Image: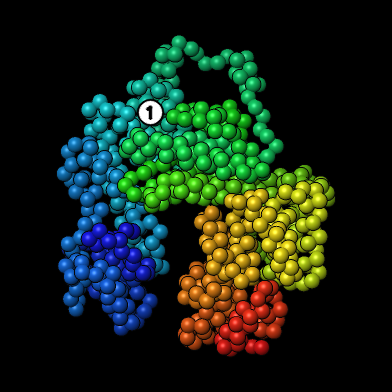
Amino acid sequence: MELDANGRAIDLPSRKVRALLAYLALRRGQPVPRDTLVALLWSERGEDQARASLRQSLSTVRKSLGEAAGEALVSTGETVKLESVWVDVEALERAMASASAPEELVQALDLYRGELLEGLAVGEPGFEQWLTAERERVRALVARLLTQASEKLESEGRIEDAITQIAKLVVLDPLNEEEHRRLMHLYARQGRHDAALSQFAQLKRELDRQLGVEPSSETLELLTGIKAQRRRGSGKGELSAGEADGARAKRPALPDKPSIAVIPFINMSADPEQEFFSDGISEDIITELSRYSELFVIARNSSFAFKNNATDTREIASQLGVRYLLEGSVRKSGNRIRVTAQLVDGNSREHVWADRFDREVDDIFAIQDDLARSIVSTIKGRVDVDLAKQASKKPTSNLSAYDCVLQAQALIHHYREDDFGKARVLLEKAVSLDPGYARAHGWLAYLVATELLYWHMSTEGIREAIALGEEGLRHDDSDSRCHLALGVAHLFDRQHDKAGHHLQRASALNPNDDLVMIELARYKMYSDEPLEGADIARQAIRQNPYHPNWYWNILGRCLHTAKDYRGAISVLRKIENTPFWSHVYLAACYTAVGEAGMAAVHREKAMALKPEFSLGQFETIFPYRNPEVLGEFMQGLRQANFPA
């Protein structure tokens, strides 16, 4: 959601206020009863309290709009309406009703930059139900606009432009079989038979994955005709069995570690000049992926050989000798950029992962770097998870050391005590299978070090983690997991200089590893550099959109240590299934800002989760480098009335 008044960008302070203004904007000029707004956004509050919340939110909107509020926001004792504003959804609706030239439709479609009110959630059933319906309405409107634009372009003989619009439509609605057929037909008209066949393969894959059905007889008849047309046009039949065997024999075998090729991202922008940007994104991702020694990455020249090539994903993977393909698209419009990416298993054609990234355009090169790093970090984790799932399907008696480590990684990422126990068994087996396997030692050391933080803080545990990490480094002194584990263990052994050395070394070895980042943020917090720690924690969260829940805890604690108590509260409240120590920090923060009632709520929740909790026990755990910082923290907990 973006809002500006007289050219001035406006940042609304809360989700409820944004939701209120969005609802009024999509009913521009219509008086909305206050009772309707209350039921949508404050349904669980009493009537008086809910109406007070509405008044407060309207007051916030007026302050945010400034002088523009006078003519834009009109309210009475019973209704509220928004007028004298421009709303992009209305512009789309006007284009649908009046646009005649295809250029007008394409220009209007540039307003659609993603899902309506993407990311906005307020936890109110009424509002969420309304928003779901509105999103479907807007998505259907855009689909109709794309259809209308492509049909007009096709009627004018502008086939390539029509293909561009239909391609966007099937991205928006991948199960629209009729539009897939239109693409197949237009590709065939251009003589691009491979592209038509690839489009059929994409449709078949989506229908099977989402609905479990086959393409219709009409689509299959079109496919048969295109295949026959291709054979006639090329003058060649299918490969003979001997030729096919010879071609397969020349193709590279899969390497012995996860392998991936990045297919050049498609430029979805209206401007062909933006081709360099989508190519730059693709190249940056290849460069960043190549930093990971755990991955086998196809070089740029090989990947770019498949640019604008509609060859089937299985065929591309086979030709390049890789397991995974990363493909996607880039769309730049105005001052916004959207990148979509999907990771495909080259054997099964299954989608392992997909996501999209939206950014403002300020510095085009910085954006390329930011997007590349974000995508790379997420893909690295998703490849690990996918391989771990496959390894877990093998019989236990046949597990290799590598399989054990992959399964253990997946278990460790759950951060549950019983899963840690299972992971320890797997990692110990990996070490016994291959005593020189540094990564197995590293993960086992990290597991033991992490257990110290969660469940079993002890001198013996610290010694064990250090011994395991050092043993791993004896086999490979460049293993980042070993350095990470030693950094955590030395930190809780209060050897801050050693901890900093190993964590910085882990970061240098694997600069895109979000787990290294978040542990480095923890170290900075304990080393009297909490604001730098907060910046690193935010970077870790940006790097890994699927980060574990406890990343919020580290960021919140950094802000608490920096005495940004309101900021810490905002972050700590994002944590799902809040553990007891987060309630402890929330109690301390609320005490610091003078909200004794909320502090008491979180103190009681902490004690309910851990009845044996005491400040004396808690104080011995924290390895703050500066004893004064620890003293201030403990004093805040005493003021929150935790038991000594």
In the depicted view, which residue is nearer to us: 393 or 80?
80
Q: Is residue 334 visible?
A: yes
Q: Quadrant of the C terminus?
A: bottom right
Q: Position of residue 367 (x, y in %)?
A: 45, 48
Q: Quadrant of the N terminus?
A: bottom left
Q: Residue at x 60, y 64 (%)?
A: 521
Q: Position of residue 153 (x, y in %)?
A: 25, 31
Q: Is residue 429 visible?
A: no
501 vs 379: above or below:
below
Q: Would you identify the image quadrant in which residue 585 lies?
A: bottom right
Q: Position of residue 202 (x, y in %)?
A: 45, 35
Q: Would you identify the image quadrant in which residue 556 lies?
A: bottom right
In the depicted view, which residue is nearer to us: 9 or 481?
9
Q: Residue at x 57, y 88 (%)?
A: 639
Q: Is residue 490 left or right of residue 349?
A: right
Label 1 secondary element: helix
Q: Position of residue 546 (x, y in %)?
A: 54, 56
The residue that label 1 is drawn on is 184
Total number of numbered discs in the rendering: 1
In the depicted view, which residue is nearer to us: 408 or 592?
592
Q: Is residue 389 left or right of residue 178?
A: right
Q: Would you identify the image quadrant in which residue 41 lies?
A: bottom left
280 vs 438: above or below:
above
Amino acid, disc 1: Met
